[in-house]
Image: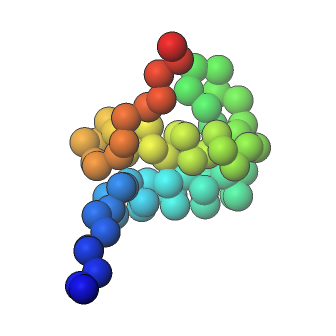
Amino acid sequence: MAKKAKKRKYSKGAAKKVERAMKKRKAGTLRSGRSGKKVKSRKQAIAIGLSEARKKGAKVPRRKSNS
């Protein structure tokens, strides 16, 4: 039996955006949207990277909706 090729959930472009956001957070230059506060949280940095990737049209799964 041949192994089934696994599809990527996130595109390479999305990974690059997240990586960029993480580096900016580490450097202390990543800021959040409207308030412009400095981002310290790792999760928030990832969310910002994915959000930017979505805006660029990269392959990223949909946000989880609050229902």
Q: Quadrant of residue 47?
A: top right
On screen, residue 62 versus residue 48, left or right, reads left
Q: Residue at x 73, y 43 (%)?
A: 41
The percent coordinates of residue 25 (x first, y second) are 67, 51
Residue 23 percent coordinates (x, y): 61, 60
| Count of numbered circles on the image | 0
Q: Residue at x 60, y 56 (%)?
A: 22
Q: Is residue 49 left or right of residue 62?
A: right
Tell me which residue sits at (53%, 17%) in the image. Answer: 66
Q: Which residue is drawn at the image coordinates 28% and 64% (left, top)?
A: 7
Q: Quadrant of residue 38?
A: top right
Residue 29, visible in the rendered structure: no
Whole-percent x, y for residue 14 in the image: 38, 54
Q: Is residue 36 visible?
A: yes
Q: Residue furthest top?
A: 67
| Extreme-bottom residue of the structure | 1
Q: Is residue 30 left or right of residue 4?
A: right
Quarter containing the N terminus? bottom left
Image quadrant in which you'd find residue 10: bottom left
Position of residue 29 measured from the top left corner of the image (x, y, whole percent): 66, 48
Q: Residue pushed farthest right?
A: 40
Q: Nearer the viewer, residue 14 or 21?
A: 14
Up/down of 35 relative to 7, above or below? above
The one of 43 and 23 positioned closer to us in this rendering: 43
Q: How is the image coloured?
A: rainbow
